[in-house]
Amino acid sequence: MEIRGPVVLPARREDIELRTVDDLTLVGELALPLDRDPVATLVTLHPLPTAGGFMDSHILRKAAGRLPALADLAVLRFNTRGTTSPRGTSEGTFDGGANECFDVAAAMDLVRERGLPRPWLVGWSFGTELALKYGRDHDIEGVILLSPPLHRATADEVAGWSADRRRMVILVPEFDDYLRPAEARERFSSVPDATLIAVEGGKHLWVGETQTRRVLTEIVAAVNPDALPLPTEWDDDAES
């Protein structure tokens, strides 16, 4: 079977709820390798909910659908406050990235409570703003930023990572709608140890299997490079 599009590979999947310190319940899903412990954890932060972003935004859904099986990763997805997906609606209302700090904290609480190893924040678009603004407050190995627009994260918040030893990996599409590679290099220049990857032909929404595979490959390259190259075929009989 070719691994592409909506294919969901075997994993242990659990509907979860997160409780924030301001007393909201957020809905989500935790996906774990089927028959072994994960080697690292992706805590995913979705694109802008007022523009259609949610925990099922396709790159995050495909990460959860593939990477537990292909790369031994735990993948936590959740809807930030006021966001709806087929999993349900998280309580509260969208706050433009301000009180969403409590949402990130609630996700990290679950990671700690479950003893999930080596957590990374993986933000996409609006999710990158949350990772930049609040990631340094938590026990993570690093951040992976997909299509960062830098609309809400300030220059000071970006520069705050300059003295932080944790890794920052930035994927910037060649044809991004908001921030393209040349400007991204300038605006992230305050973090000299960041790894900025300009993706030729890429666009903000990473549409198409070629772009999906590139993004997932770069995530795994940062978090568990021993799992590369990612297979493009899956033997159904291997799990039977």
Image (tube, grey):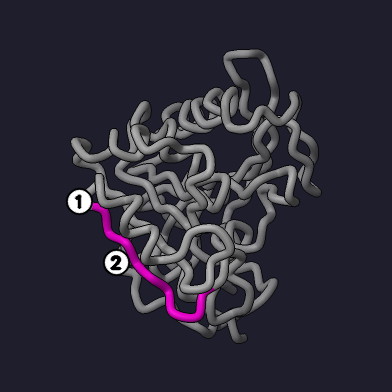
Nearer mark to the viewer, of 1 and 2:
1
Coordinates of residue 64 in the picture (x, y in percent) = 57, 58
Crowding around mark 1 (Cα neighbors within 10 Å: few <14, some 14 to 19, many 20+) is: some
Give the vertical position of 2 relative to 12 (above or below).
below
Judging by the rendered image, the residue that carries numbered circle 2 is: 225
**Mark pair 1, 2: CA separation:** 22 Å
**Front residue of this view, candidates 239 and 146:** 146
Give the vertical position of 94 relative to 31 (above or below).
above
What is the quadrant of residue 199 in the picture?
A: bottom left
Q: Name the residue: 62% across, 86% down.
A: 1
Judging by the rendered image, the residue that carries numbered circle 1 is: 192
* Type of amino acid at the residue the image marks with label 2: Pro
**Front residue of this view, candidates 97 and 28:** 97
Is residue 195 highlighted in magenta?
A: yes
Image quadrant for the C terminus?
A: bottom right
| Secondary structure under the numbered disc 2 in the rendered image | helix
Q: Name the residue: 71% across, 44% down.
A: 49
Horizontally, is 64 left or right of 173 in the view? right
Crowding around mark 2 (Cα neighbors within 10 Å: few <14, some 14 to 19, many 20+) is: some
Q: Name the residue: 39% across, 66% down.
A: 181
Is residue 69 highlighted in magenta?
A: no
**Front residue of this view, candidates 237 and 72:** 72
Q: Name the residue: 25% across, 45% down.
A: 190
Looking at the rendering, the stretch of residues picked out in magenta corresponds to: 194-202
Horizontally, is 127 left or right of 199 in the view? right
Coordinates of residue 115 in the picture (x, y in percent) = 40, 34
Say how many tags the image has.
2
Coordinates of residue 202 in the picture (x, y in percent) = 51, 74
What is the quadrant of residue 131 in the picture?
A: top left
**Front residue of this view, candidates 42 and 147:** 147
| Secondary structure under the numbered disc 1 in the rendered image | loop
Of the numbered discs 1 and 2, the one sitting upstream in the chain is 1
